[in-house]
Structures are given as C-alpha cells and as structure tokens.
Amino acid sequence: MNMKKLLAILLIIAMTFAFAACGNGNGSQEEDQGASDEPMVYKVAMEPTFPPFDTIDVDTQELAGFDVDLMNAIAEDQGFELEWINMGFDGLIPALQAGNIDIIASGMNASEERRQKVDFSTTYYDSGLVIAIKEGNTAIKGIDDLTPDMKVGAQIGTTGADLVNELYDEGKIGEAKIYNGLDVAVMDLQNGTIDALINDLPVTKAYMEAKPGTIEIVGDVLNAESYGFAVQKGNTELLEKINAGMQNIIDNGTFDEIYNKWFE
C-alpha cells in the first residue's frame, strides 16, 4: 500500500470518530431531558417584596405568594419542574433576555413597552396604580394634590416608577424617589421620608392589612394594567405550555382556590 492510500484511510477513520463524537454531544436542555424522559426544569425568577403576589414565607423563608402557587400549579399540570430564583425587579427582563432565567413570575404588568422585549402569557390578574399616604395626612386626597415640594416614591422597574418619573419631569413633584425594594419604600412612607407612594392596588392593600393604621389609599385607581408571566421573545414552546396549564387550572377550579387563598 502506498503512502497516499494509507493517509486517505487514516483520514476516513479520523472523520468517522469525529462525527460519532458530535452525535454524542450534550445538545440543548430540551433534547437532553427529553431523551432521558426526565421532566424539564425551568428557572423562574421573582422579586419578593410584592405581596400577596410575591413574598417570603415567614416560617420557611422560601419564596411564596399568588405567583408562586399559580406557577407551581401550571408546572404540575404540564409536567415540568421549577427552580425558583430571588432577583431584583429591574434585573428580571435583562436576565430573561440573556437566557439566565426562563420565566418571570413577579406581578409584572404586560405592557406594550415590555412586549417589545419579552413575550407574555395570558394575563391572570387585572390591577391598577394607587396613591398611598401616611395615615392622617390630610394634604393629599389624590394625584392632583401632589405639589412641587413633595417627595413621591415607587419601586424600580415598575409602572409606578414610570408615573412618578413622569410627574417629576413635568414639575408636578419635587423629587422622584425610586426604591429597589417596595418594603423599604413603605417604611419610608410610614416614617415620613416620602409624602406619597405610587404602587399597585392589591399590593398596597396587602401592606395596609399587615400593618393597620399606618398607611392609606387616596384618590382613584390610575393606569389600569394586567399581570402576565413572561418568557424569552420567541419561546413559543414554553409560552404554549404556560397558557395551556393556565387554562386547565382555570377550568378545574385550581385557579379559584389559589386566588381565594391569597385575596379572600
């Protein structure tokens, strides 16, 4: 056998092993878990200072709330599992876009602006913004009573923060104080550091119920909005699972049971 034939045979053998190695690669998460019949595990993130949607259980110190129970019920219905992650609200969408998480379940308004960045599930709760003040503050009865000498707070990354910043840009308030966590914002409202807080209605009510006599809601509900679960843009497979699971738990009564647990 001459040298050229020997080299050709060796090249064929090397290519055969190379293709075999490629065929045994890890592949995507879906391919790996699908092949082994293991359930899919999705990373789902939330910011836990938004009760009753997103909070921390005082006994277990684990993430809890309406969003947690709802997403867990959807996962059980659809046969996938969840890994819950505690994350700052303003970091949720960037983490989803980067592929570091798979789902946002954090009382997020499915606004048109956010729909440009992520895909939302069927919405599951209709809400709106309200103005909260320290109980006994008679100077503020609604949004029209906010003045250029007042400090108004909101949570970072929320539609409440958008409205507060808008009021500041228009010169209607003296300072827009934006907080990383809503719990700190409520505390500042209670001790008078800020004059008012703009936040979602059910969450503000939850804080009022937790500490009666400290804050109150004034004026009309502002900026009606609806909450949805978010997935990465174009992830139709996961979105369809969430929507199908949502419809199933609505149909079998599980949704109402979870709702009554957190809102009745």
Image (cartoon, rainbow, N blue to C red):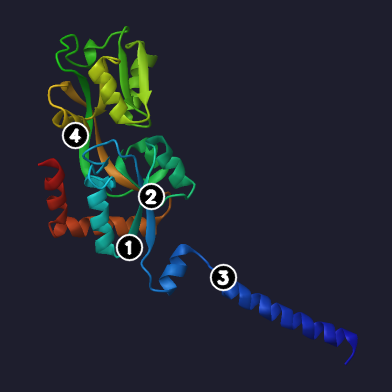
Say if mark 3 contacts mark 1, CB within 8 Å: no
Q: Which residue is mark 2?
A: 231
* Label annotation for residue 106: none
Q: Residues within 10 Å of mark 2 (few under 14, many from 20)?
A: many
Position of residue 93 measured from the top left corner of the image (x, y, whole percent) = 42, 41
Q: Earlier in the sequence, mark 2 or mark 4?
A: 4
Residue 249 in the figure: left or right of residue 116:
left
Looking at the image, is mark 2 or mark 1 earlier in the sequence? 1
**Distance CA(mark 2)–CA(mark 1):** 15 Å
The percent position of residue 146, horizontal first and vertical second, equals 26, 12
- Residue 180: percent from left, percent from top: 37, 30
**Residue at 11 percent of width and 46 percent of height:** 260
Say which amino acid is labelled 4: Pro
- Where disc 3 sits, the SS reads loop
Reading the image, the residue beneath label 1 is 80
Mark 2 or mark 3: whose residue is earlier in sequence: 3
Identity of the residue drawn at 61% across and 72% down: 22
SS at mark 2? strand
Q: CA distance from mark 3 to mark 4?
A: 48 Å
Q: Earlier in the sequence, mark 3 or mark 4?
A: 3
Q: Which residue is mark 4?
A: 202
Residue bearing mark 3: 25
Q: Residue at coordinates 14% horizontally, 13% vertically from top-left? A: 136
Cα separation, mark 3 vs mark 1, equals 23 Å
Residue type, numbered disc 3: Gly
Q: CA distance from mark 2 to mark 4?
A: 24 Å
Mark 4 and mark 2 in contact (Cβ < 8 Å)? no
**Numbered-mark total:** 4
Circle 2: residue type: Val
